[in-house]
Amino acid sequence: MPSRLAAPPSGLDRGQVERIVREIVLRSHGLPPSQAARNGAARDAAPKLIVSISARHCHLTDEHVERLFGPGRTLTPMKSLYQDGFYAAEETVMLVGPKRKMLPTVRVLGPTRKASQVELAFTDGISLGIDLPVRASGKIAGTPGCVLVGPAGAIELTEGVIRAERHVHMSFADAEHFGVKDGDRMSLAIKGGCSTVFRDLLVRADATSKLEVHIDTDEGNAADLDHAESVELMRQ
């Protein structure tokens, strides 16, 4: 026979009885009711999502910093980025493409890397005459090159100019929340006057990253991100 809740003692309504029973059950599992509620809320709460427009920029090796800005020079942090330990440097370079078409001011981001890399939007590539491949950051084998010019010299990159594919940084805890893992793909819905859904965002999960989507200037302008009403990250 199905079990039934006995009639509550005189002076107690059903809600009070159910609350008492629930607290007894929670204590039997070793958690005070208030802590159990907080833990549940922490699991269910959506992580804070930041969507950032990644404007044209470059990453440099230590060697290339010295060749462009002078012997012994290091990058000078100007502004911290959202991800801890990363920054926009005061230093900029001129980028020269085929047929001497150029971008006069391209910001350098720090810290330095093992390989120099330039990240541009498609419209930048069109103005420079470079057919930009879409690549994950760091995957530069077989990509076009360019010339970078600084106040102390110039370097010719034989490869490393890309349009970085849209991606989302997250911690392992964020990945667990969304039910994804490093290397998976997600979608970003931007709601507003130019509502847009960007698909195939690459998930880049590690132990320390904060939840942040990177799209380029073309994508941000197309979706009018600055006036968006809401943004939502979704599994595909």
Image: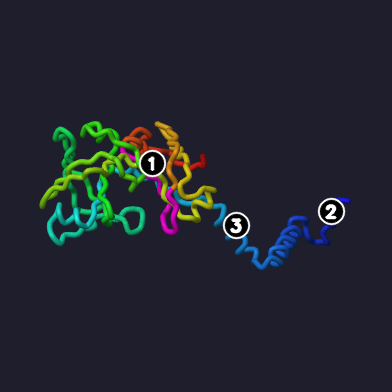
Instruction: Judge left or right: residue 113 versus residue 24.
Output: left
Q: Which mark is residue 40?
A: 3
The amino acid sitting under disc 3 is Gly
Mark 1 → mark 2, Cα distance in angstroms: 55 Å
Look at the picture and state if 122 lies above or below 170.
above
* Disc 3 to disc 2, C-alpha distance: 28 Å
Q: Please say if the residues under marks 1 and 2 sit with CB atoms less than 8 Å apart.
A: no
Name the residue at 65% across, 63% down: 33
Q: Disc 1 versus disc 3: distance between alpha carbons? A: 32 Å
For marks 1 and 3 on the same chain, the one whose residue lies earlier in the sequence: 3
| Secondary structure under the numbered disc 1 in the rendered image | loop
Residue at 18 percent across and 34 percent down: it is 98
Amino acid bearing label 1: Arg
Mark 3 surroundings within 10 Å by alpha-carbon count, few (fewer than 14), some (14 through 19), many (20 or more): few
Amino acid found under the numbered disc labelled 2 = Arg
* As drawn, 164 above or below 196: below
Q: Write down the quadrant of residue 113 in the picture.
A: bottom left
Region in magenta = 204-217
According to the picture, the residue beneath numbered tag 2 turns out to be 4
162 or 12, nearer to the observer? 162
Residue 133 in the magenta stretch? The answer is no
